[in-house]
Image (tube, rainbow, N blue to C red):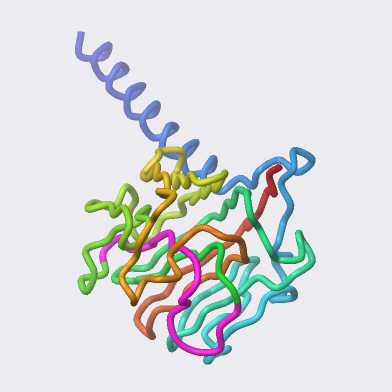
Amino acid sequence: MKTALTKIVTLLLFAGLSGVVCSTAQAQQPPPEGDGWVSIFDGESLEGWQASENENTFSVQDGRIVVDGERSHLFYVGEVADHNFDNFEFRADVKSMPGANSGIYFHTEYQEEGWPSKGYEAQINNTYEGDPRRTGSLYAVQDVKESPVDDNEWFTMHIRVKGDSISIAVDGETMVEYTEPADVERPDNMSGRVLSSGTVALQGHDPDSVVHFKNIYVKPLD
């Protein structure tokens, strides 16, 4: 009886561990090319990207973009769709270090200084204490109160924009489904938070916010 119970417990533990491994591996797998997905990061350089105010915040290490430094934003300025996306999907694998704050802007445009004034932001923030908006939020528009993922672990951020609708998913779990009203009004400090078209940008928030990105893809939609 004891031997049988031990075997059952071992099998359950192995199954649980296998599920974790499979889930982690799945989160890091890039979308299949040939299905409309196009890579916008070559894993070796920042070709096709342009950083604002503090370019040293961004570097490429071991096939990933590492964000580590003063406030800066890294804008995609490459050839895919002439870096001007209207209806599209975006996917990236992300790893956020403890206490980090970051985000992915979309429908934005290059800006030399400050926080991008145009477009929306998909928030990355698992444990940063200075802001309660957690990973998966559509920043300051539809916010998530609890992060669905942990620091130091890879997860997949998936953004989809189609018509007046925005969805944000983290590891396959939908965190936000938002439809922008036809007569949307924003406060003056958020006047640019509306759907239009534009590029994507990765955020470097502050020197204590270290975040890694890899497997960065977009899929333009009709």
Q: Position of residue 168 (x, y in %)?
A: 44, 47
Quadrant containing the N terminus is top left
> Considering depth in this image, is 27 or 22 the residue closer to the camera?
27
Residue 147 magenta: no
Quadrant containing the C terminus is top right
> Considering depth in this image, is 8 or 176 the residue closer to the camera?
176
Residue 125 magenta: yes
Residue 63: image quadrant is bottom right
> Considering depth in this image, is 189 or 65 the residue closer to the camera?
189
Q: Is residue 16 above or below residue 145?
A: above
Q: Position of residue 36 (x, y in %)?
A: 74, 43
What's the magenta region?
110-127
Q: Is residue 129 above or below residue 135?
A: below
Q: Is residue 130 above or below residue 196?
A: below
Q: Residue at x 40, y 39 (%)?
A: 174
Q: Is residue 180 left or right of residue 198?
A: left
Q: Position of residue 132 (x, y in %)?
A: 21, 63
Q: Is residue 63 left or right of residue 136?
A: right
Q: Is residue 168 above or below residue 113?
A: above
Counting every numbered tag in the picture gives 0
Q: Position of residue 86 (x, y in %)?
A: 63, 54
Which residue is most to the top? 1
Which SS does the magenta portion mostly show? loop
